[in-house]
Amino acid sequence: MKLLEVKNLQTYFTISQGTVKAVDGVSFDLDYGETLGLVGESGCGKTTSALSIAQLLPKEGKIVGGEIFLEGQDLAKLTDEEMQRFRWNDVSVAFQGAMNALNPVMRIGDQIAEAMILHQKLSRQDALKRASELLELMEIPGERIRQYPHEFSGGMKQRVMIAMALACNPKIIIGDEPTTALDVMVQAQILNIIEKLQKEFRMGFILITHDLSILSETCDKIAVMYAGKIVEKASARDLFKDTAHPYTKKLIGCFPNIEGEKIVPAGIPGVPPNMLNLPSGCPFAERCDYSQEICRIKMPESLEIRPSHFVACHRWEDLINER
Amino acid sequence: MSSLKNEMRKRKANAFLSSIVHNKMALTGTIILGFIILVAIFGPIFVPFSSTDLGNVEDMLLPPSARHWLGTDDMGRDVLANLMSGARISLLIGTMATLISMIIGTLVGIASGYFGKAVDNVLMRLTDFFLVIPWLPLMMVLAAILGTSIWNIILVIGITSWAGTARVVRSQTLSVKERQFVERTVSLGAGSWHIMVRHILPNVFPLIFANTVLIAATAILSETTLSFLGLGDPSRASWGMMLHYAFESGAASSNAYWYYLPPGICVVLVVLSFALMGYAFDEIMNPKFKER
């Protein structure tokens, strides 16, 4: 049995101007000890997909269709109270922006201990003891649980967020841009710690980011999202080597290659489509170099072009044959 | 490591103390208030008279002398002794009423800001009621109904002066509850009580603290007003009661300045010291005013 299987997930936001299909028919799976990268532009639905798994959506958002199997149990059908048992114990989230996710007037240890006291009914003393062990695991001296957030550096705060996510020994951790706004050295350090922990505890890790360079290093699988849909999904190696979707190709083109020629990163012209009013055809057609008549009329289906490599594009063959 | 931490802590405490010492307003306020508190506690030991000693007829309304430093009142009691026992009562009423006011204000403010919607509406309309109602007549009516005991005075002042605090605490709560760490705690499944006590209260506390000092000044002034109007506890004379008796006995027209001036000056000094401290705390704790 897979650790996590998401099938045809649909999460919609109902706002005064209409319905936003933030996540529309997304499927992916994750095995023990595996890392899945979700990548895409801002507002493409990557965070919403991940938060749907833990059902931590804002009140306007709702899962309207699809299934989320965690070790065979469908989380999408659970009520909020039933979900409470799985949240943190099985699925936890390391939040975006550690600087704001910590209470400035509460000791670090108490903040890490909070989850354990609330979810595992540990005594404060036991929880604090575990909190200091978790800090040690994050390569921060354990006695620093007695300090306040302002005494920690940005990278340390981010590691505290991961320690919090680890508190109840979850099976899956969702990292929502865990290294954004940190310098590359600290990024590497944090990603190494995560990798080490994953091997040790056989946890599944979902990494949300817009930084492809991080993904190529850490992820086993990568799903590229655009306008609420997964446009390409493959192993990290296949995705970079045999790119089959024009959007993925453009994304990769945005990052300079250290070994290649000196070029100006290309960028992607245009802006993502209005999520309230999606075109009937492929949402990327407007910005795509490859778009044809059919792209504007018919939404492309997701095809498995080779084992475990899915693409939703009418013209994937042209891209593959190009090289 | 730990010695370093202690060193840091010591330095921080020193920085706070030195910022009080270097702030002239804070220093003045603290010295005045400290002096009055010390006199209220230890003063009676050094004065050979008690505020309950009634003198003989020839002791009535004596001007200040070597025997009676501040003279005597119309019943032959030593004014200095009265002043000292009055200080105890005034300060006690001031602190207790402030405490009640702060507790009500904080509870209402946090609950209102945190729960929002209907709770907010009901609590804020109640707050508006207490804000706009003329508080002096309200206090007089309440004091008259409840009867004139020291605890009733405390209660009356406490329940009429919390509205401003509730407003300030509510607005700060509104901003704190939108912060991400509150969202994170909600996602942990923490209850409202846990979030309000562990996360919001510590974040609004500096505001409550700064407010306390200013409310204390108002509370002492209110007590003086009520007592002066004859609604104080006659068995335990505060400064306001002394002014009341001085007025009743016609001290002003008989030129017995030693009778009505000391309690009046004391009230002014205490209120002034609280106000000075309040402004100074605001300056020290509000980073906007900090000189770098």
Image (cartoon, grey):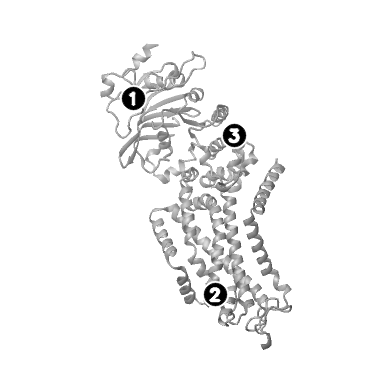
Residue B233 higher or lower than B32, as above or below: below
Residue at image mark 2: B227
Instruction: Decide which of B100, A12 is in the foreground and name it.
Output: B100
Q: Residue B197, position in %: x, y?
A: 52, 53
Instruction: Decide which of B5, A37 is in the foreground and name it.
Output: B5
Inter-mark Cα distance, 2 to 1: 79 Å
Q: Amino acid at mark 2?
A: Ser
Earlier in the chain: of badge 1 and badge 3, it is: 3
Q: How many marks?
A: 3
Q: Residue B148, position in %: x, y?
A: 53, 77
Inter-mark Cα distance, 1 to 3: 40 Å
Q: Nearer the viewer, mark 1 or mark 3?
A: 1
For residue A121, the mark is none
What's the chain of the residue with tag 3? Answer: A
- Tell me if label 1 and label 3 are in contact, CB under 8 Å: no
Residue B43 higher or lower than B245, as above or below: above
Q: Nearer the viewer, mark 2 or mark 3?
A: 2
Residue at image mark 1: A284
Q: Secondary structure at mark 2?
A: helix
Residue at the spot 58% in from the left edge and 76% down from the top edge = B243
Inter-mark Cα distance, 2 to 3: 63 Å
User: Does mark 3 fall on the same chain as mark 2?
Assistant: no
Q: Amino acid at mark 1?
A: Phe
Q: Amino acid at mark 3?
A: Met
Instruction: Decide which of B178, B232 is in the foreground and name it.
Output: B232
Q: Nearer the viewer, mark 2 or mark 1?
A: 2
Q: Is residue B228 left or right of residue A321?
A: right
Residue at the spot 48% in from the left edge and 66% down from the top edge = B160
Residue at image mark 3: A138
